Amino acid sequence: MKTLVAFILFLYVCKSSQLQENSTKRVMGAYFANWAQYHTKPYTYTPEKLAPIIGKVDQLMYSFLYFDDNTYNVRLIEPKDPEFIKTITGYKSSNPNLKVIASIGGWNFPSALFSKMMSSSESRSAFIKSLKDTLEKYQFDGVDIDWEYPCSSPRTDYVKYTCADIKDSHDAGGKCPDDTNNLLMFVKELRQSLGSDAFISFASPGSKDKWEKWDLKTMSSYVDYWHVMTYDYTVSDIKNSSVTAPNAPLYTPTDTNGVVQWSIDYTITGYLAAGVPANKIMLGIPLYGHTWYIPNIKGDEWQSYGLNASIQGDCCGSFKSTYGALYGKGSQLCGTYMYSEIVAAGPLYYFDTKTKTAIAYMAKDSQDGWTKAGTWFTYNDKNSIDAIAKYVGEKNLGGAFIFDTSEDSLSYETGEFTYTLMSALATGLKGGGGNEGQKNFCAPSPSSQCNVCQKCCKNYLTIQRDCDACVVINCP
Ligand SMILES: *[C@@H]1O[C@H](CO)[C@@H](O)[C@H](O)[C@H]1NC(C)=O
Ligand SMILES: *[C@@H]1O[C@H](CO)[C@@H](O)[C@H](O)[C@H]1NC(C)=O
Ligand SMILES: CC(=O)N[C@H]1CO[C@H](CO)[C@@H](O)[C@@H]1O
């Protein structure tokens, strides 16, 4: 009897202390990309594909919407946007907690236009009025402003439509210190106009020279979340980027031979030091990796950062002379592979425990006939996500978001998405800790429930441990 009472007491204490320690609800955000509908099969991505994961998403950013150069009216950009938005807001009937957010701007949208819109009280209010109408019309719960970036220098971007159609788009950039001051006025007016219930977030930069151009602390009173873009610390699709370095390292690489000395931890520490409340920080996780071309590496030398890459010359137009390897089969972006494309290529795999990032390498051509020997990848896999989720718990952040849903794992036979990475993130955030070192579920199991799991395992023969997150969805 005594033992039983003690046992019940133990359960109770255990439960209540858990609740206390992790009482903050950590949320999972996800960007939906309206251009992923153009990915080649089986990677084609439309809102229906969200069904298996939508129950675990707290806020979904529909990206991207633009606004007009002269009237500042918000405008949809893809013919299917209205239909897509309707399908996505329809998911609220199965997940009542889901918030659907209109994300405006993005990296292809000129910074100069944001600068212009923010510059006068008249243009700001024209934009905000149109935004309010748009949110109401399409039943969005709020807005995510994706200005890249206030005070940016003029730049020319190569925007690829097809291999033969690459446009150089010139962006006059921003204006300092006006952008900083106008942005603060804008967020005050935005909150005032949308009211306290509306969701307001900003995509914000990962590097100090850029975030210093924002009044992060004062603006924090008016925003729900900062979507901190803690990725692309190093990219390969620009002319001088010849040395390999991680896309989104949790901790700063220790290699110093030309490797960029930045990390997620460096950015988050900087935001906290700037006075941003931890619970307003959403840590960003890319579901894609960057590639370089490094033929004929000796032995295990590929298992590190700081390698010198060669120009492969297989990308199109202006990208041909960069160090990025040939684009992935489905997404067609030079120097970039979606997580699903990396898995399909079947490379050798290594996990760098210092940065919590995955490195992979094609020692030979892939069996799918696309990815060439010598392709080298840096990306964030399930092991990275487990470590990041743990970090989010330790720092008591608001949560984490992924960019973007179309890049997660799928079944190559059926085109159904299996969401290995997003499932792992949801589990990690829920535990308030992360599931680092969790047991591998891939072992054959006699349970009938696990038939689906074993089918899923088959799709991940090369990266077997990814199956366990798949089980979270398919074998409840
Ligand atoms: C490459 O050039 C960009 C500007 O085009 C510059 O910001 C960056 O620091 C350069 N990187 C290296 C490794 O030299
Ligand atoms: C990369 O190239 C630089 C300059 O040629 C050289 O100093 C460095 O040792 C090379 N690094 C590696 C890992 O081969
Ligand atoms: C903020 C906080 O106390 N987070 C803790 C939640 O619980 C995990 C373990 O379950 C800890 O690692 C976190 O530090």
Image (cartoon, rainbow, N blue to C red):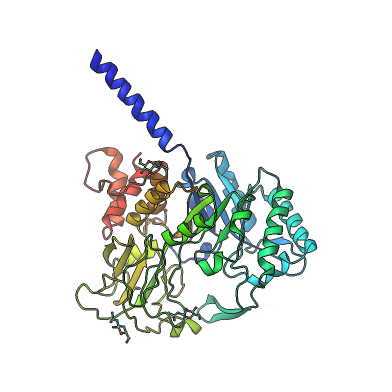
Residue 222 left/right relative to 471: right
Quadrant for the N terminus, please: top left
The residue at the far left in this view is: 299
Residue that appears at 24% across and 14% down: 2
Any part of residue 65 in sight: yes
Residue 87 left/right relative to 429: right
Q: Quadrant of ligand 2?
A: bottom left
Query: Residue 110, percent across and down?
Result: 63, 72
Q: Which of 53 and 393 is in front in this view?
A: 393
Q: Nearer the viewer, residue 292 or 458?
A: 292
Quadrant for the C terminus, please: top left
Query: Residue 140, percent across and down?
Result: 64, 49
When the figure is inspected, residue 101 is found, relative to residue 122, above or below; the finding is above
Residue 273 left/right relative to 67: left
Query: Residue 444, percent across and down?
Result: 21, 45
Residue 103 left/right relative to 261: right
Residue that appears at 38% across and 31% down: 17
When the figure is inspected, residue 120 is found, relative to residue 188, above or below; the finding is below
Residue that appears at 27% across and 38% down: 448
Q: How many marks?
A: 0
Residue that appears at 46% across and 36% down: 23
Any part of residue 418 in sight: no
Quadrant of the image occupied by residue 265: bottom left
Q: Which of 409 and 83 is in front in this view?
A: 409
When the figure is inspected, residue 347 is found, relative to residue 135, above or below; the finding is below
The residue at the far right in this view is: 122
Query: Residue 79, percent across and down?
Result: 64, 62
Quadrant of the image occupied by residue 119: bottom right
